[in-house]
Amino acid sequence: MIAFALGALLAAPIGAVTAGDSTDAADSAPLDDRVAQLQAQEEERNAAQIVELTSLARRTQENLLPVLDGLAGAVPAGQPPGPAAPQSDVEGWRGITRDVVEDFANPPSGGTGVNIARSGLAAAVRALDAAIDTYTAALALPQDERGTLLELAGRQRDIAVTTWSVAATQLDVLNVDAGNGHTHIFLPAAPGQGALTADGVPEGE
């Protein structure tokens, strides 16, 4: 009789714990499902933002090519300044860089990798826009007083190209990880600018 009572006393707490575990497991199931759903939504959002940012980067690259071609003649990397660019050309460059800076304004919130790539591209276009401002200021000076500002404009352009190359490499990694294959969206770089360049893997592979 005593043994039976003792067994009953021991069984009661064990049963309570077992019942509690079962209840906790049932309660946690909806939470686990919600976490999985949020993770899936985050992955889907990041995948869409990678595609959108890649498209924006490609358009920006194409738009900036005339600016970089012009600056390559006006302030060649590692060389003395070239002939002054026509004012109409400089105004055209400024219009382009102003537009691309605006394209990167008010970015959406994304995953860390996407945010890093977008921020790098945005910093690059701002640096290039500053280079155009500096070059414009140089042209406003007498020719024999332009040297310092022309050198600064060239350095700002170099910083822009190098910064873009780092961000473009990050964007390439994001596309590979997302299953989109390699995406090489680099700006033209001259020797000595310290810019990263595309690897030898073909686009999309």
Image (cartoon, rainbow, N blue to C red):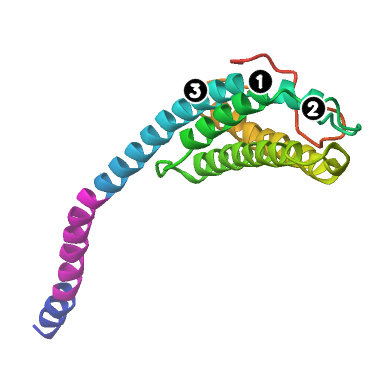
Seen from this angle, which residue lies furthest right? 79
Q: Main secondary structure of the magenta part?
A: helix
Of mark 3 and mark 1, the one earlier in the sequence is 3
Seen from this angle, which residue lies furthest front? 142
Q: Nearer the viewer, residue 95 or 10?
A: 95
Residue 55 is marked as 3
Q: Are marks 2 and 3 in contact (CB under 8 Å)?
A: no
Q: Residue type at mark 2? A: Ala
Can the viewer see residue 55? yes
Q: Residue at x 47, y 36 (%)?
A: 102
Asked whether residue 27 is drawn in magenta, I would say: yes
Where is residue 146? Give x, y as percent: 82, 41
SS under mark 2: loop
Where is residue 16? Give x, y as percent: 15, 70
The residue at which mark 2 appears reads as 84
SS under mark 1: helix
Can the viewer see residue 182? no
Residue 65 is marked as 1
Q: Nearer the viewer, residue 120 or 139?
A: 139
Mark 3: few/some/many CA within 10 Å (<14, 14-19, 20+):
few
Q: Nearer the viewer, mark 2 or mark 3?
A: 2
Q: Which residue range is magenta in the image? A: 12-31
